[in-house]
Image (cartoon, coloured by chain):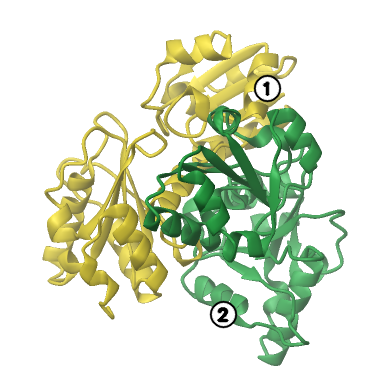
Chain colours: A green, B yellow
Amino acid sequence: MLIFVGLGLYDEKDISIKGLEAIQKSEKVFAEFYTSKLLGTTLKKLEEFYGKDIELLDREGIEIKSDKVIDIAKDKDVSLLCAGDPMIATTHIDLRIRAEDACVKTRIIHGASIQTYAIGLSGLQNYKFGRSTTIPHPYKGIIAESPYDVFKNNLNNNMHTLFLLDISDDPMTINDGLDILSKIADKRDDYNFKDNLCVGIARAGSEHPVVKAGFIKEILDYDFGPPLHTFILPTKLHFMEAEALVKFADAPKEILTDKK
Amino acid sequence: MLIFVGLGLYDEKDISIKGLEAIQKSEKVFAEFYTSKLLGTTLKKLEEFYGKDIELLDREGIEIKSDKVIDIAKDKDVSLLCAGDPMIATTHIDLRIRAEDACVKTRIIHGASIQTYAIGLSGLQNYKFGRSTTIPHPYKGIIAESPYDVFKNNLNNNMHTLFLLDISDDPMTINDGLDILSKIADKRDDYNFKDNLCVGIARAGSEHPVVKAGFIKEILDYDFGPPLHTFILPTKLHFMEAEALVKFADAPKEILTDKK
């Protein structure tokens, strides 16, 4: 059996009891940290805490050479660990399909994902979020504009947008992400973009996450400290949401009276 | 300090290690199970597993008489437990605001929510989900139509919709939920509604959840067994999503070739 185990975010203690038991019963444990990362711990700490050796897989190991994982899972209990929730990444959905094709049973042990953490920490209301999107690093100087389209479309439908940031190589900062969106806004003569509110969230899952709300033009230069970062661009706020942002995210008090 | 602890879904082992440690260090432990429920366990089992007495709060205890909770949290570490993730329910956001108003520090320990479980189990892609919505029990025979509007709006924007079902009193079944939506569709002469695909999910988080996909007209009579139930009405599928639904949710094979 191939068991996908979500570790939650941040460190070795964000895993569920059920997940921990599954790892300890497994005969082989793999992990991958390219779809998501745990910045509050190390592979060595995970191994010590779980009491198991862990073989780290890179992208190729999951996407191309995954036959190895599936082969071992044919007659052994194998766990595959990843940060957050396993099924947020399409890579794992694909691996699960291939395992079932090879008659290998699969099981999912969920973990809290960045969506849960970010929305929860912001104080914004979950049911007001539309589609979320990921901002990739520019590739050969070319900026992908689809994240901006997702935001505008959500805004037209009165929904908040959660932006996940590229974590490959150098994890993207909130400032970099906003800078990319601002360039797209400039190109499209969308002059009001920088007046939109932004809720930046750094190190979700740690004991002292930073949650800071302000207008984009202010947040563009705000120092959120080390990664991982993510941010939300909200649509019109419910009064209780505005109150939560002022209380928990040091948002400018004017949003309490704004009818925006 | 008031610590909101998410228990994840289903039973006592879906809590994170971090959450368990917080409970065990707390001087007073409250729980509420009216915003969400754990059907794989009992209050007694939770108390035994966590090694703590738990005082159960009803809706009034959280929404009106919460001063008691906040008062105790002024000089003691108090945990408030709930199923899923604590900040999905606006009730807890409100309580957190009132705690901070009373100068009581708060902390959130996240748990995997029904959104994570349901989307993960379905095999559908997370970034294609629009706003989610809850179907309430009809009140004095009157059906709330807003969930249907959320679905139609998501559909127009090519987004999937996750439907949460009323858990007060008698938890709503998938069949009841679809029946309510069908009545609204009939009233609006929306004749194609029952040809939409539906992914029903029962007992997410248990070792043997039921995940069954089919057209609404078929799923209307499908027996999903005991609660809790939830369902997804997808928009157009990516090919890999169709493959996942056929593999994991016994969807009709025709969706693999449909260009719908």
Q: Quick check: B253 left or right of B62?
A: left
Nearest to the observer: residue B64 or residue B168: B168
Q: Nearer the viewer, mark 2 or mark 1?
A: 1
Nearest to the observer: residue B55 or residue B193: B193
In the displayed structure, A50 sits above or below A148; it is above
In the displayed structure, A162 sits above or below B119; it is below
In the displayed structure, B135 sits above or below B160; it is above
Residue B85: x percent and y percent? 53, 38
**Residue under the image location 35 percent in, 65 percent down:** B243
The amino acid type of the residue labelled 2 equals: Asp
Say if residue A219 shows up in the picture.
Answer: yes
Indicate the quadrant where residue A168 lies: bottom right
**Residue under the image location 54 percent in, 41 percent down:** A78
Label 1 CA crowd tier, 10 Å (few <14, some 14–19, many 20+)? some
Discs 2, 1: same chain: no
Q: How far apart are marks 2 and 1 (CA)?
A: 41 Å
Give the residue at mark 1: B22
**Residue under the image location 55 percent in, 74 percent down:** A150
Say if residue A7 shows up in the picture.
Answer: no
Instruction: Give residue A149's mark.
Output: 2
Residue B93: x percent and y percent? 57, 39
Q: Mark 2 lies on which chain?
A: A
Label 2 CA crowd tier, 10 Å (few <14, some 14–19, many 20+)? few
Residue A63: x percent and y percent? 58, 64
Q: Quadrant of the N terminus of chain B?
A: top right
